[in-house]
Amino acid sequence: MNGMDRFFDTVFVRPPADSYVECISTNPARTSIDLRLAKDQHKQYVSTLRESGIQVIELDPLENLPDSVFMQDPAILGSRRTTIGRFGELSRRGEEKALLLDLRDRRIDTGTAHFVKQPGTLEGGDILITDHGIFVGESQRTNPSGIRQLSASLNDIDVSVVKTNLLHLLCGASYLNHKTMIIAPDLVDPESFPSFRFIKIPSEEAYAADALYLGEGRVLIPSGVPKTSMKLREAGYKPVEVEVSEFYKGDGGVTCLCSPLYKLF
């Protein structure tokens, strides 16, 4: 598979550390995280990405940073430009530095690095990347200063602000291809994205709005969302299900578990 219509061919992942059970989460089920199952689910997630022709680079787990399995948040990596975020969640600060050290040690070139500085906060889960501009959630974790700094570092790309009450914008909407988004309209207003088409999913399956486009019509979604699967098929996509129950308990979804190296910038 060549996945020509996706924005990345390489992603970085970090397996859950033993400390993952101490992650920050608003999910009442957080206390029932099964660490062994989480590690198995992560391996299956990696295998699924590789089956789609994606190069997966596994970094070491970080015991001192329980949330570091959620690789999407520390930075937006590009082949020419990279923006290193600054966590709104204080306990996660340090993940950015660890990622930078990993990239350096492995001699991986991610172009010119821009660092979000105080008072800005910016987390990757708030950044919705399309080939018609970037949308950034002004959320509990990402503030206006952080968004302005991202916009300045990507000064040739249209960056739009979407105010959200969600933990992260991608909890409610994700981009697929051909100007089409999967969205939970009860959580994110489709009018925030003028001229896009939408696959609207019901509120009881809103967790599936955090979806990862794998290329060639394949869409990675959590298992157990039959209405979403049906809607994707009706729209001409092929849903690819992966079990992520232990990451749901940690307030994470399928996009949260990897940091793509984007070809767009």
Image (spheres, helix red, strand yellow):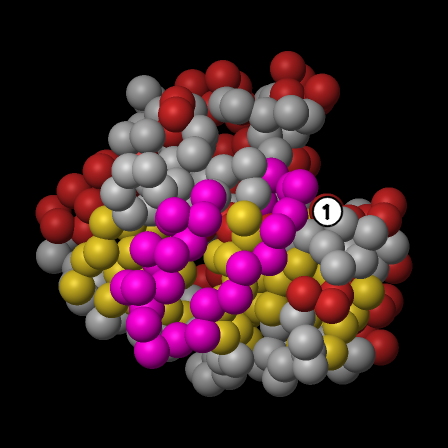
In x, y percent, where is residue 72?
A: 44, 49
Q: Badge 1, how many Cα within 10 Å: few under 14, some, many 20+?
A: many
Would you say 121 lies left or right of 174 here?
A: left
The region drawn magenta spans 143-168
In x, y percent, where is residue 58?
A: 33, 48
Q: Which residue is at 32% across, 20% downward?
A: 64
Does residue 97 appear in the picture of this structure?
yes
Instruction: Establish if 140 lies above or below 161.
Output: above
Would you say 235 lies left or right of 34 here?
A: right
Q: Which residue is at 62% across, 84% downward?
A: 178
The amino acid at mark 1 is Tyr
Instruction: Establish if 197 lies above or below 19.
Output: below
Q: Nearer the viewer, residue 42 or 131?
A: 131
Does residue 56 appear in the picture of this structure?
no
Which quadrant of the figure contains the C terminus? Answer: bottom left
Instruction: Establish if 86 lies above or below 83.
Output: above
**Is residue 159 located in the magenta-colored stretch of the structure?**
yes
**Is residue 164 located in the magenta-colored stretch of the structure?**
yes
Disc 1: which residue = 207
Q: How many numbered marks appear?
A: 1
In x, y percent, where is residue 173?
A: 66, 59
| Residue 217, picture quadrant | bottom right
| Residue 63, picture quadrant | top left
Q: Which residue is at 49% across, 38% downward?
A: 141
Q: Nearer the viewer, residue 100 or 187?
A: 187
Q: Which residue is at 39% across, 23% downward?
A: 91
**SS class of the residue under badge 1?**
helix
Instruction: Establish if 99 lies above or below 190.
Output: above
